[in-house]
Image (tube, rainbow, N blue to C red):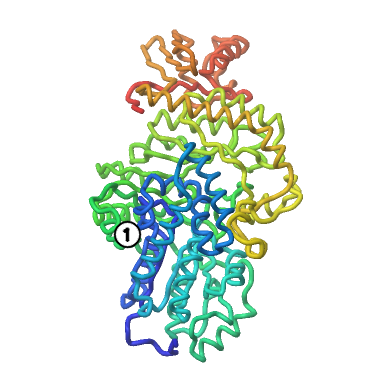
Amino acid sequence: MINSSPSLSPFQIRLISMPWAIFTRPSIQLAALKASLAEKDPTLTVNCHHHYLEVASRLGGEEYQWMARSGWAGEALYAPLLYPEMADSSARLFGKEQARFRKVRRGVDFGWASGEISRCLGDFIKSIPWQDIDLVGLTVCFNQFIPALVVAREIKAIRPELPLVFGGSSCAGLSAQSILDEFQWVDFVISGEGEAPLGELVDFLRGEVGQLGPNVLTREDTSFKKSPQTQLLLGKRQAELVVGCPSARNQLASLPCPDYRDYFNEIGRYFPGAPFVPTLPVEFSRGCWWGKCTFCNLNLQWDGYRAKTAVQVYDEVKSLAATHGCLDFTFTDNVLPVREAREFFAMIAASNCDYSFFAELRASQRYDFPAFRVGGLRTAQVGIEALSPGLLRRMNKGVTVMDNVAAMKEAVAAGIVLEGNLILGFPGSTADEVRETLEVLAFLLPFLPLDAAFFFLGRNSPVDQFPDQYGIRSTGPHPRMRALLPAGPVKRLDFLVKGYRGDLQHQQRIWRPVKMAIAKWHDFHRRRIQSGLSGPPLSYRDGGGFLLVRQEQTNSPVLHHRLRGLSRRIYLACEKNIELDTLAEIFPEVSRQRLVAFLGDLEFKKIVFRENENYLSLAVPQRGLEW
């Protein structure tokens, strides 16, 4: 039973991250919470468990990776452990996902994989002295929901009185309340940012404070043992369980550097011989400074946008690199801050260290690509999402088709690998918007291919909040959840991803040609790699008075274009997207009619892209570029 006065023995906390987190990275959620708790009270004993490392070692890294990319396949392996009656439907979903991601006739057997998952879970449960623990916390992000429920129930079966808390992006707002209502073995759910609320929960459980903060939800009939004082307080809070608690907005400047030591200790246990060098997550900002995309619900757990200073992030990177001997980092931000990112990459460039970074950016940040590349940015995910003007407006992306195409070109020119998605099936999409998308795709062959991502309805996204505006007649649980959970929980739980009725079948049909075009785009680049081709598929060499443009094609010979004199100068003037009026001012000796005709010919040859009266040359300088 929890005493109302502080205990003389150290308060022991276990923080757990379940599959399907990327196993070559530590959990920044666990590391940030551990560092925050240690700074708050050095007497606390906090141990982090990256159970996904153990699972990856059992299944094999390659198998784990495709299951993690799928998400649904990973959840399907755990679903029968929670609800045995869902074994058959989970196995069918697993098979569909395996066919989608691996494209093999004979792959991983569901029975074998689920058996390994079960044995791995049993070994983990047996390895922890739960009787000595005072609080267990589970981070629940994306496809960790069912795995977290399974391990939580196993822990409670051993020690029902042990307090257990959920937190993470999957526990924001309504989800937090529905988890508490449905699963009696979950005692607390933190909605929003976790550092301060978790510290408050620890103080509350130790009897050092008289109430929980507004971000820590619980219920009166929770299963852990309570002192009379705590019982009274929880009874009073029963009426306070409300949707959309205000988040505890952390001042990022005050947060300590993440503590990844437990992860590296576990690597030695589960992957002896160090078969990989981990990529370390770092956090520059929380939230999104744009925050207007109508399909997005990624910021439910954040309260506004704020960022660390460039100096603080630089110091964290230097410290983490020195501590763990790693040079590869991934920013967890939805989008990097504009000014601070420029300062940061300039500092990294001046450090003469060979760091490598992944970051998410907006197309409007493309002019910074060259400087970011010098500062170590190797891969960028840019929110392309659409290549139709109408779709971009309804998605409220705040960019044009030209912005997106120019960002893809600038990434190639800077030597940055650009990753991005093209959202198919956005509700209300028209045949004309599909046609516009296909027309633009024809110009993008030389750039690294985007991934096709069929639209999903995110809870509390603007599309979800105003469904009538997008032709959505009704919403409900996502169909795949019905394969994983019984009808009762599916109906009562509030998931981050929802199903909907509207024009879904129509969208699937009209977007099929785009899906096929993207598959051919991927195949073109795959065959280039297999044949040993290097360098960008569309590039130029400058001879001073002329340009030689080299253009690879699909299933056709390589084309070579020679642009002399004035033609060369006009083409180079279009290296950054430029308006026709501006070109006419730069080249007054060329009539507007001749200028349009010349650019139209280059557009026909797919070496210039045009949107309205905006032009962009697509070839990049061959000099210094390696692929």
Q: Which residue is mark 1?
A: 263
The residue sitting at 55% across, 19% down in the picture is 583
Q: Is residue 236 left or right of residue 571?
A: right
Residue 403 locus on image (x, y percent)? 55, 33
Q: How would you rate the neighbour count of disc 1 (Cα within 10 Å): few for under 14, some for 14-19, many for 20 or more?
A: many
Location of the N terminus by quadrant is: bottom left
Residue 473 in sight from this viewpoint: yes
Q: Quadrant of residue 116?
A: bottom left
Q: Which residue occupies the foreground of this view, 481 or 121?
A: 121
Residue 267 locus on image (x, y percent)? 29, 56
Residue 31 locus on image (x, y percent)? 37, 62
The residue sitting at 44% across, 89% down in the picture is 4
Determine whether the residue tagged by mark 1 lies in a helix, strand or loop: helix
Residue 523 locus on image (x, y percent)? 48, 27
Q: Is residue 45 left or right of residue 606?
A: left
User: In the rendered view, would you say 98 is above or below 137?
Assistant: above
User: In the rendered view, would you say 112 is above or below 597?
Assistant: below
* Amino acid bearing label 1: Tyr
Location of the C terminus by quadrant is: top left
Q: Which residue occupies the foreground of this view, 174 or 287?
A: 174
User: In the rendered view, would you say 247 is above or below 312?
Assistant: below
